[in-house]
Image (cartoon, coloured by chain):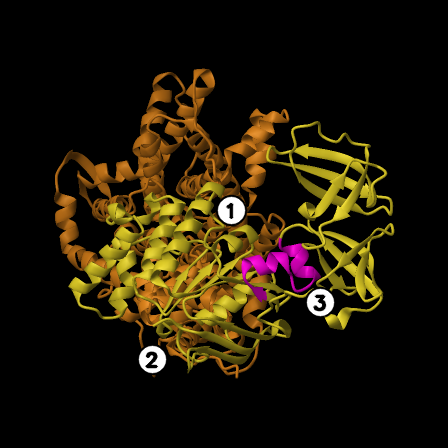
Amino acid sequence: MVKKKRDAWLIVSLVLLASFLLFLVYPMFGLLKQAVISPEGQLTFAQFTKFFSKSYYTGTIVNSVKVTLTVTAFSLVLGIPIAYFYSFYKIKGAKILFVLSILCSMSAPFIGAYSWIMLLGRNGDLTRLIEGFFHLIGFADFELGSIYGFKGILIVQCLKFFPLVFIYMNGAFKNIDNTLMEASANMGCTGVRRLFKIVLALSMPTILAAALMVFMQAFADFGTPMLLGEGFQTFPVLIYNQYLGEVGSDYNFAAALAVIAIIVTAIVFFFQKWATNRYKFSMNALHPVEKKDAKGLSGFLMHAYCYILVAIAFLPQLYIIYLSFRNCSGAVFKPGFSLINYQQAMKKLMLRSIKNTAFMGILALVIIIVIAVLIAYLVVRRRSMLNNTIDTISMLPYIMPGAVIGLALLLAFGKKPLALTGTFAIMVIALVIRRLPYTIRSATATLMQISMSIEEAAISLGASKAKTFIKITVPMMANGIMSGAILSWVAIVTELSSSIILYNNRSITLTMSTYVAITRGNYGIAAAFATILTVVTTLSLILYLWVSKSEDVQL
Amino acid sequence: MSVTITINHALKKYGENTIIPDLNLEIKPGEFFTLLGPSGCGKTTLLRMIAGFNSIEGGDFYFNEKRINDLDPAKRNIGMVFQNYAIFPHMTVRKNVEFGLQNKKLPKEKVKEQADKFMALMHVDEYADRLPERLSGGQQQRVALARSLCIEPDVLLFDEPLSNLDAKLRVEMRTVIKNIQHNVGITTVYVTHDQEEAMAVSDRIAVMSAGVIQHVGTPKNIYQRPANLFVSTFIGRSNILNGKLEVVDGKTFVVAPTGYKAEMVNVQEQYKADQDIVLSVRPEEFLLSRDANAEGIPAIVDDCVFLGLMTHYFVHLESGEEAEIIQESSIDSIIEPGTQIKLTLNTEKINIFTADGSANMLTGVCNDCAN
């Protein structure tokens, strides 16, 4: 009597599972194998022994964890107040502040690093300006501290990641019902006490989610420590150096490092899940909080805080645009303005980079959206062991830093029968894997909000299951998917850490071109590439705000 | 064109949990049939089995002679109205209404004509080009109704369609639904937990509890001659008193807790014997006397509530049982709390049940679902 319908969705499930096994599980497995099997085919933990026996190696993980935790803490400390002021007070020019913050969070981190080197490096414009000022007023020996090392990474990453916290927290604060605020005031709890006891306590799940997001991204960030680290070596840099080091590649050791990296991120991931479980509640505000006027001294201070913070965060992007129009030869900027950097960039594969970026980005995005929608549907509407397995596997990349994914794909598809190295395909696969978990989350969350009865209504009106899915379910998910998709798009365009391992001259992207120009000392050309990249992300954001007709961004 | 729905030995299980053990029902062509019961009684489950959204673990469902157990829900030609309206939020009102017609592959002019007709019928034609988010709940429900009616379904299914509306709109919309159904004459199954709503709209009502149909009948019959104690307490309010049945010289008497006796002329033959019974007396079926010496059940007034047309008295009997009495308000003074009164029974109206409450002992019970 009872029979489960075997329909097209089962085929979808199986195809998805097969793709994940091939492009995700198999490379992961290969990575693990590479790490524990010696070139002679023996099981060995020599690579791990090597890692833990030298403080040169273990130091990198200490460095990474130290700087990443500090960045996470500072990003929260910087981001929560601006989100609070933005959500609870009428800040003048609030929308512009918000949009600029999103732009900051969207730029590739290493471009920020590069810009800060130009500003505050040993020969930076700001360095000379400030030191010159102090010399003038009599402190002849004054020297600005170094931007390199721990401090530099901290500054650059904080300024890049606090907007993430801002965007996250803004979403949480909007869900706080005004009656909760009033009830709290009624019982004599207002001001700072209410901020901590009610507002932040209610937002705890989001604070933890934002913290995890910042941690994962900061930990995996390769470009910033590469450019700014100098003696302060972090983990992704070590992996990259082992893969393409000065002393030749050591794939086995690089694989072992990748495994260790995954273990670290997995520990953080599960710790965050455990912590989040202790704050399980959901809110949906019927009466959103009414923004208050920001008046008097406190109002002035709020404005000052918001403006100064966003200005500092946005400064590097403006400075890069300015530099791109300066005369430059090699690493030296000269007085006067021209388009020479852009002309030079044309010779350095600029058109190919733009074309590749657009082609691979759009292709990856389409694949991501299709897979995310299908998985969301399977997980939400067709719960089964099989589909839950697919969901779990699809979340794996969340704890895999970009460099690890790059390395795993390289090891898996570097040789026949599936020799994909250096092709567009492997770059697109890497991009898809990198962004998929985020888009799946937002698609799943969107679908959960949609009442099942709407699909049932369509079916009872005679629509087939396929038609219901395409004409009802997907359009209703469109808003949620779009908001995730544009942000995925920007992340794809600015992807560095996996691409750097997988790219070659044919498949070079804008971000890669920028990075290559910086590392080769072609600073002017790098500025030109970075400017184009900024223009692309800005246009994407404008498109998003225009399409979604909202001033809000959810990640 | 109207359809008879026949359900034989329906069985519904979720895993090991049996929701509906064995249910038989016949819904007549063109009838407005309501499934009424407390939440969790299986009424929505049954409706969704008819619609095809729940699997059927056993039994047979027929539309006329056609067995529909394995028929795709999209092909059952059902118009369904949901509690949350289930209006497609990304389509205008017109697109919503036309959706089902387009699935029938009707020509364009016919689709437009039919949609226009039903939007006008439901008075939503003026919003035809609006998106539903700008409509009120009542308007959305009208759109949902137009949408499900315009495909000219064989069966209309309503799943608590009014429970998200405010009280005033609820009353207004139930009249709309009743009139429309009456005009189009489509066999209708309506699920609700609101008994007043059920009374107002239905030709017949099935009272359900724990997956079992307790009583199928007209609203009047269910209220006046409930098939068992559950129905008697679930529909309207009833005071429940333990009593006895006595047969003296061929006459049958009920004996109330304190010994008050009243003759019953409508007891079924099979029950005419001395036995324990349960009396079910609705608040308006008590007659109240201020004369402490009169015959009747002695009681003391605890509280009284004046509601204009009616006055409610809350009393306790000497045996400790509490009771509620409703009297038409009289012009003289209200009986003060603490006053001794006497209660007599309107024997024509009260019901008596077997001691376990499983059956009504009186004649005149019409249960179309006699198990």
* Label 2 sits on residue: A418
Q: In 3D space, how far apart are the residues under numbered discs 3 and 1 (Cα atoms)?
A: 65 Å
Instruction: Give B224 or A77, whichever is nearer the viewer.
Output: B224
Q: Chain of mark 1?
A: A
Where are the magenta residues, as a range?
A: B216-235
**In the rendered structure, which disc, 2 or 1, sits on the residue that comes first in sequence?**
1
Instruction: Give B204 or B69, whichever is nearer the viewer.
Output: B204
Q: Position of residue B85 (x, y in %)?
A: 41, 54
Q: Chain of mark 3?
A: B
Q: In 3D space, how far apart are the residues under numbered discs 2 and 1 (Cα atoms)?
A: 38 Å
Which chain is drawn using yellow? B
Q: Position of residue B15 (x, y in %)?
A: 60, 74
Is residue B217 located in the magenta-colored stretch of the structure? yes
Q: Nearer the viewer, mark 2 or mark 3?
A: 3
Q: Amino acid at mark 2?
A: Leu
* Label 3 sits on residue: B359
* Label 1 sits on residue: A211
Would you say A423 lies left or right of B225 here? Answer: left
Q: Name the secondary structure under disc 1.
A: helix
Circles 3 and 1 on the same subunit: no
The tint chain A carries is: orange
One can see residue B36 in this view:
yes
